Amino acid sequence: MKVSVIFPTYNERDHIVKLVNDTVRILKNENLDGEIIIVDDNSPDNTAEIIEKEFKTSPVVKLFIRKDGRGLATAIKRGIRESQGDIVVIMDTDFNHNPEMIPLFVYMSKHFDISIGSRYVVGGGMLTSQFRYYLSYAYNLFIRTILVMGTKDNLSGFLGIKREVFKDMDLDKIFYGYGDYCMRFLYYAKKMNYKIIEVPVVYNLRLSGESKTNFFKHTVDYTISVLKLRLFGIK
Ligand SMILES: Nc1nc2c(ncn2[C@@H]2O[C@H](COP(=O)(O)OP(=O)(O)OP(=O)(O)O)[C@@H](O)[C@H]2O)c(=O)[nH]1
Ligand SMILES: [Mg+2]
């Protein structure tokens, strides 16, 4: 069984080498055959150059640089298309998501089609301020209610997915925008009756660098996405 770990990067120069090395070590310790797919949007801080220099000879690290446009969800889509693993793991590249959880996602794939790294089930949480935690909890409650989702963390962004889930999926209709791809993906998966589990994860603080999330703009965009999904489904 092969695992593809997808890392979308934009200005993550100070911790990307550590993240890749940690991930390679974690996969090796668990005897997991894996590949690391990095999709960088030509980051002005030279993230791609650093990766190229450090992992030029690595057989498992594959770097793709996009020079025409930017975007988190389309970077992940490119990563999925370039990947070959039986299980695809999607995660942030700033240590918000702990790579030590990857083997658990792989284990879960024996029983489930999709694992969500969830902040809102027992054992999960966020090391951010209480304010941010409750704000994101309340917003996720809104999504869950409007879309009638069984799952609690529909904006997780930390996912383990069996390849066959992508088989009949039109990636272009789901992987656009920013973190809202996650709710579209889970909405689709629910409609298709895939087996989903929420695994508790703790959302850590980013290790260094700056956030690319514009909370006001993204909340407006996500709300439009929720309403569109509710009214029209995946179109
Ligand atoms: N390729 C690519 N990656 C992106 C883009 N925007 C964000 N990312 C990556 O998406 C992930 C999430 O972005 P962050 O800036 O960490 O957003 P956040 O996690 O909401 O904010 P923090 O909690 O402050 O880290 C990170 O791994 C980013 O490098 C983009 O336009 N292109
Ligand atoms: Mg982050």
Image (spheres, rainbow, N blue to C red):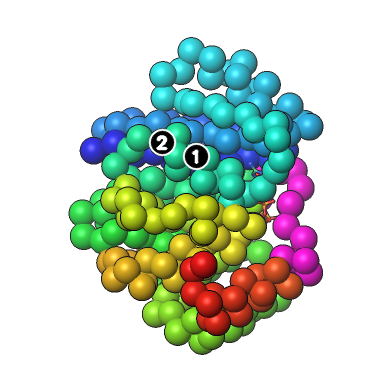
- Name the quadrant of the N terminus: top left
Q: Which residue is mark 2?
A: 83
In the image, taking residue 4 as reference, residue 175 lies left or right, namely right
Magenta part of the chain: 206-218
Residue 25, can we see it?
Answer: no
Q: CA distance from mark 2 to mark 1?
A: 6 Å
In the image, taking residue 5 as reference, residue 12 lies left or right, namely right
Q: Main secondary structure of the magenta part?
A: loop
Q: Which residue is mark 1?
A: 79
At horizontal 60% and vertical 55% (from top left) the residue drawn is 176
- Where is residue 73 shown, x and y percent of the image? 58, 51
At horizontal 36% and vertical 52% (from top left) the residue drawn is 166
- Where is residue 78 shown, x and y percent of the image? 52, 40
- Residue at the farthest left position: 110
At horizontal 70% and vertical 31% (from top left) the residue drawn is 67
Cβ of mark 1 under 8 A from ligand 1? no
- Residue type at mark 2: give it: Ser
Residue 198, above or below 223: above
- Where is residue 61 shown, x and y percent of the image? 47, 26
Q: Nearer the viewer, residue 115 or 164?
A: 164
Residue 120, above or below 108: below
In the image, taking residue 168 as reference, residue 98 lies left or right, namely right
Report the number of numbered marks: 2
Residue 187, above or below 39: below
Residue 178, above or below 42: below
Residue 231, can we see it?
Answer: yes
Instruction: Please tell me whether mark 2 sits on a helix, a strand or a loop.
Output: loop
Contact check, label 2 and label 1, Cβ < 8 Å: yes
Q: Is residue 209 magenta?
A: yes
